[in-house]
Amino acid sequence: MLKTRPTRDGTVKITFSLPADTPPTSVVGDFNGWDPYATPMRKRSNGTRSAVVEVPAGTRLQFRYLVDGGEWHNDPDAEHVDGHYVDAPDGLLTV
């Protein structure tokens, strides 16, 4: 699930959320240089996982979820575009 929230300083906070049964996962995309260690999703008290990033308003992001063990997943709430490193589409979000 994706949630966006504009801030007063012209940026947008994006919250990436996954269900409680999700194993350790990172959000990987052009906003963090496709670094699989840059944006790990933290486990919440209710078992779900989430990560928050802040980007300038008007940014177009490409991203995917990288599950521990090397599996790539898309967010069903995102648009999809051509793949980046793999033969599957990346998620697209314009904020």
Image (spheres, rainbow, N blue to C red):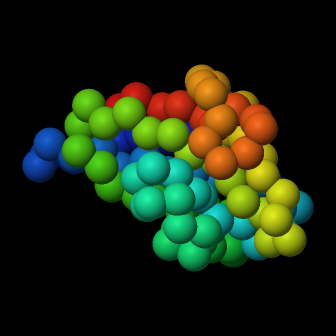
Kindly tell me whether residue 44 is visible in this rendering: no
- Please tell me whether residue 25 is drawn above or below residue 62 in the rendered image: below
Query: Against 55, is 69 above or below?
Result: below
- Residue 57 to residue 55: above or below: above
Residue 69: which quarter of the image?
Answer: bottom right
Left or right of 68 in this view: 38: left
Q: Is residue 4 visible?
A: yes
Which of the 4 quarters of the picture holds residue 32?
A: bottom left
- Name the spot of residue 56 as percent of width and height, x first: 23, 44
Q: Residue 22 at x, y = what percent?
A: 83, 61
Q: Does residue 57 appear to the left or right of 5 in the view shown? A: left
**Residue in the image at 72% along x and 60% along y:** 66
Depth check: give the residue in front, 70 or 94: 70
Task: Give the number of marks.
Answer: 0
- Return the residue found at the far left: 9
In percent of width and height, residue 4 lies at 42, 40
Q: Quadrant of the N terminus?
A: top right
Q: Nearer the viewer, residue 94 or 7?
A: 94
Which quadrant of the rendered structure holds the C terminus?
top left
Q: Residue at x 64, y 65 (%)?
A: 26
